[in-house]
Amino acid sequence: MHIYINDTKYEVSENDTIIQVADRNEIHIPRFCYHKRLSIVASCRMCLVDVEGAKYPQPACSTLVRDGMKVNTTNTSASQAQKNTMEFLLINHPLDCPICDQAGECELQDVSLEHGDYKSAYNEIKRTVIDKDIGDLVSTEMTRCIHCSRCVRFGEEVAGIKELGMTGRGEETKIETFINQGLSSQLSGNVIDLCPVGALNNSLYKYSARTWDLKQTSSISSNDCLGSNIFYHTYKDEIKRCIPKEDEEINLSWLSDNDRFGYEGIKSDDRILHPLIRRGDNLEKTDFNTISDYLIESLKLYSKKSCGIMSAQSSCEEMYLFQHLLRENNIGKIDHRSKECDFRYQKNFPTIPSFDIKLSEIKNLDNIIIIGTNVSKEFPILSIYFREAIKNNDTSIFSFATYEFEENFPLKKSHVLNSQELADCFNTSTTETNVDIDKTGNNLIILGPAISYLSNYSNILNNISRYAESNNMKLSLLGDQANTSGAWAMGIVPHRLPGGVAINKTDKSGNYELLSDTDDLLVIYNLEPEYDFSDDNKILEKLKKSKANIFFSSYMTESIKKYAHIVFPLSTQVESSGSYINTNKKLQQYEKIINPLGESKDGADILLTICNSFDSSLTHEGVKKSIRAILAKINVNNNFVQIANLDNVKNSNFLEKIVIRNPNSSNPTLRRCNSLLNTHDNDDYFSIPLDKTVSDNDKIILNENNNKLKLTIKQKKHAKPINTVLVKIGGTHKEKIGAYNTEVDL
């Protein structure tokens, strides 16, 4: 098929619309309501074009092409129709461009200049709309709204939560939230980008800079393992806002709120701005040479009794240098799995755990089983792909988790089970799973990061792997942090070097303890003891007893202030350069967006300097080449983790305590973003089974590992999982919560 636009011939497909053909061929047609990733409503009428044979101009967004069609976008008929529409849309629009944050990048400004008129026939008083508070992230100036309904359709079709709607008729038409609630979707910030005028604005950016003064720099997300692509906009060395960088393989045209607003915590009062050393009971300001010498002496003195624990938020370059520094000093106990307590699986784990299929292939799946993850909250971008799969392929999605939650896509069936039931459910040697699927279909199992916190993680992983293989399913492993895949590939584990090269050890039992009484030196890199370990009581007790505690950190916490002997001030991700490996095994580079605050430094720079003090000849470029060479040699066929002769974790009469994974606490910067926490993380609770009774007062006392924990949060009740108590705590813990998974007694 072919059509003619402005007398030029173009090849087209049967279901194309005029505007799609025009966009492919860079032919300008003005529009407001049309967006390539949303449904077509043809309500604004700005895209009217002249179609030969039609009595009146036709909307290009909703008019399907036909063979031989002749379209004109610039003749008198089309131009006059567009001018009339523009005049109508401006009837009630306020002339406040000088104070509008959208000025300079406003679609209404651009279209009115090209297709509007210098005068209007309307003299009536313009209407005004009283704004409502819809949350800390998105601010409103609804008098500017032209009712394109992009924000409404986004909520219904992409975010899966209809939070904004159109009410009233005629001049009383308004876009507003229902029953005066704020926006709560983890994707709510995308309405800011979608709004073609200045009606919906970024609250953190509002009135802080002009668009033409902003410098744009591309980067990647540091908040989940998907690695969404981002543009940061800066002014005077400050991040003013963040917008999506379109990527068809990852985040399409969208961003999660964590990625969009996650820079807020950079300027927290907790930032460490100088090198620190302990003198007496206090940490005092010092210089890098002094603390570097302290570290070097400690490595020499305690090399055989040392432990290095690194955050999987770190870049591949930091990871490579970290393990190189420690291993060159005979320290082999290196790990990134600070929230795990069961390591029996580790020798059988893939060199690079991954999603196994491209995100764009999700729409072709017949069945998806998600285990232990609340996709809508933990991986909002992934939920968009799930909704597309259901819409286009009628994909069936099943959920198995240790707590009940809501998703923004329909579930075929949802199961709430305790950790032992999860392992038994997929045990192919005993009973059949509750999921009845066609083995010949295109099927996928997705294992969420919260499962790795459980004390029987190895059993669950083994059973699910065997189940997936026997049912011809692929297995995807979602990482707990942004560079979890990179941590495995770079050898931030005790039993492997970079590239997955095994380290021969005498202990073949698979037993392993992250923290032990024999450790005299702890090197903790970008982790905060109160929040980032599987048992906060255990790590704090260890810090008390160890002879040297070396911290690399961007933020000060009570435990660092109390127990650190020296502190290297780390710059945050946006103040550094490096690379992450995302869940599709894609190495993505990011560059420094702003200069580090105070004397904080890029972790790779700090580690490189220390490494070279041991007569190394490493360079930044050399490290990058080594990483690329390591990754080029890795070949992972699947994520199956099958473990022979694996003992089951014994059941007991005690209650099992499970801490619900909090996506807003995945890294130190994110947990200090107050606007995000107020919007998405304001419900702390302790939930107990219906058959258990506790006092109705605010304090709940748990007996756990010979410790008594007192929680003063809201109480809830649940029917499932049985014999399990659930704890949900906000981004920055207000109190000790003990172990993420253990046995307790109320």
Image (cartoon, helix red, strand yellow):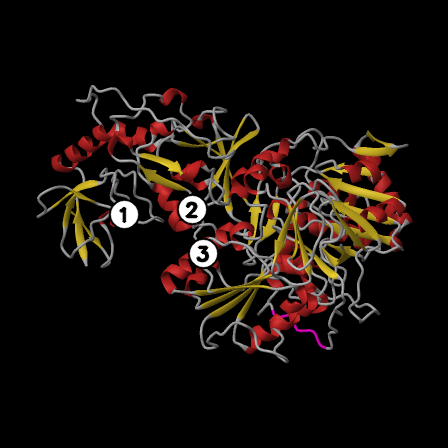
Residue 33 image point, x, y percent: 30, 41
Residue 643 lies in the magenta-colored region: yes
Which residue is at the front of the view, 43 or 707?
707
The answer to whether the residue labelled 3 contacts the one labelled 2, judged by CB atoms less than 8 Å apart, is: no
What secondary structure prevails in the magenta region? loop
The answer to whether the residue labelled 1 contacts the one labelled 3, judged by CB atoms less than 8 Å apart, is: no
**Image quadrant in which the C terminus is located:** bottom right
Residue for badge 1? 25
Residue 215 lies in the magenta-colored region: no
Residue 409's label in the rendered image is: 3
Name, please, the residue furthest toward the bottom.
429
Quadrant of the rendered image containing residue 296: top right
Three-letter amino acid code at the position of disc 3? Phe
Three-letter amino acid code at the position of disc 2? Ser
Quadrant of the rendered image containing residue 582: bottom right
Residue 683 falls left or right of residue 650: left
Circle 3: element type: loop
Q: Residue at x 33, y 24 (%)?
A: 128
Which residue is at the front of the view, 42 or 678?
678
Which residue is at the front of the view, 352 or 669?
669
Q: Residue at x 80, y 31 (%)?
A: 287
Residue 395 falls left or right of residue 554: left
- Tell me how far mark 2 sits from mark 1, CA to CA: 20 Å
Of mark 3 and mark 2, the one earlier in the sequence is 2
Which residues lie in the magenta part? 640-644
Viewer can see residue 568: yes
Residue for badge 2? 253
The answer to whether the residue labelled 2 contacts the one labelled 1, judged by CB atoms less than 8 Å apart, is: no
Three-letter amino acid code at the position of disc 1? Asn
- Tell me how far mark 3 sits from mark 2, CA to CA: 19 Å
Q: Which mark is nearer the camera, 1 or 3?
A: 3
